[in-house]
Image (cartoon, coloured by chain):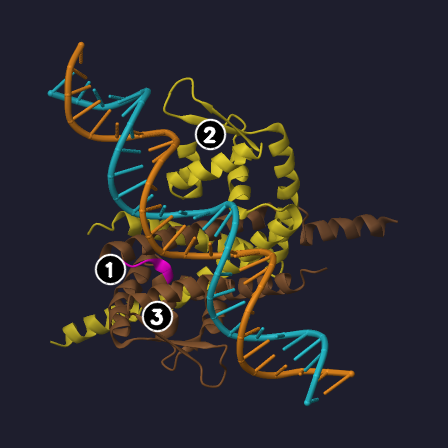
Chain colours: A brown, B yellow, C orange, D cyan
Amino acid sequence: MTMTILDSETKAAEHSDDHGDELRLWLRLLTCTTLIEGEVRGRLRERFDVTLPRFDLMAQLDKAPDGMTLSDVSKRMMVSNGNITGLVERLVQSGHVDRRTSNVDRRAQVIRLTKSGRAEFRKMAAEHEIWIADMFGDLGEKDVRELMRLLGKTKLSVRKAADGKPV
Amino acid sequence: MTMTILDSETKAAEHSDDHGDELRLWLRLLTCTTLIEGEVRGRLRERFDVTLPRFDLMAQLDKAPDGMTLSDVSKRMMVSNGNITGLVERLVQSGHVDRRTSNVDRRAQVIRLTKSGRAEFRKMAAEHEIWIADMFGDLGEKDVRELMRLLGKTKLSVRKAADGKPV
DNA sequence: TGCAATTGCTTTAGGTTTAAACTAATTTTG
DNA sequence: CAAAATTAGTTTAAACCTAAAGCAATTGCA
């Protein structure tokens, strides 16, 4: 029947089997992230002699004055828990982070920024924010809003695809 | 004079000193990339027992039938050259990549996919492309186009800021 | 031509990252 | 309550990654 042909053509137009566009989009997304990340990494090292993972972990802790468990950090930063163990260990060594066993759950370690750790982070964060604004400097307010919206949509789409993975 | 006040207010509206929006945008961009990357990494391991860096390197070589030097790869993948040395070494060991010294420049190493390396990559790439399309599945054609455009603009903006860094 | 600068790659040292196996504490459940 | 399942974190092994130093080959230029 003609209907069959029409259907397949319509479908092809709506949802093509050519996935090249999405692949190119992914590569471009990755390029942007890699560029920014590399730039931030380099500046953090030059200006403050600190690594990006250390900065990221301190950023999480700065937002949690009452401390977080390693699991919390692990989820927020989307990295493995074994990774956090080592990272925290080095930050405790350098005096940026305080670590103690939770009172309510003896498995859990609660970590916080030390006073000096917090002070140091705030200085870095202030510059960091300017770097980021500068890198997005050519985007207008409308661009920023629109990117934000589209990336929000992307985030949901990816999570959906990731959850439904075992199909 | 009144003009002064107006100017400063106008400027504030056009280019605010509040850089929070750009920071949030950066974090969202990073989240999207991390989510997709983690998902791809996991699937590559589960389905093909291959790491993401290996896959990425093979993807570069697949696009260059005549081979590339390590420097080419390093630039394309935006990673350090020392990193590539080790990665290539492992891929040569496993028989996926062929490596020989350039005829025209005895410093340079030219690497290519082996026949079996190419065959294996093609299989992985076909699935990979579907995964990516699936993850962006909730975005319409228009969304994809618009994201592509905005990320292109972002890329240029970041490069500009990175080049002008030593100011 | 000759030599300084550059380029291509490797090596080194140290940190980051993952996945998987493991211990210990807590929670769930029959 | 006791066994089973879950959760928090550590450890291990291997790979990845960077920055910096270094070596060898090539290029630029006076």
Whole-percent x, y for residue B4 in the image: 15, 73
Q: Which one is nearer the viewer's eye here, A62 or B138?
A: A62
Is B125 part of what is drawn in magenta? no
Q: Which residues are magenta?
A: A48-53
Q: Which one is nearer the viewer's eye here, A136 or A90?
A: A90
Q: Residue at x 39, y 67 (%)?
A: A88
- How far is the residue under mark 2 from the one under mark 3? 42 Å
State which tag comes first along the sequence, 2 or 3: 3
Q: Which residue is mark 2?
A: B68
Residue B53 in view: yes
Q: Three-letter amino acid code at disc 2?
A: Met
Q: Are marks 1 and 3 in contact (CB under 8 Å)?
A: no
- Mark 1, chain letter? A
Q: Which residue is mark 3?
A: B20
Query: Which marked residue is nearer to the observer: mark 1 or mark 3?
Result: 1
Q: Residue at x 45, y 85 (%)?
A: A103
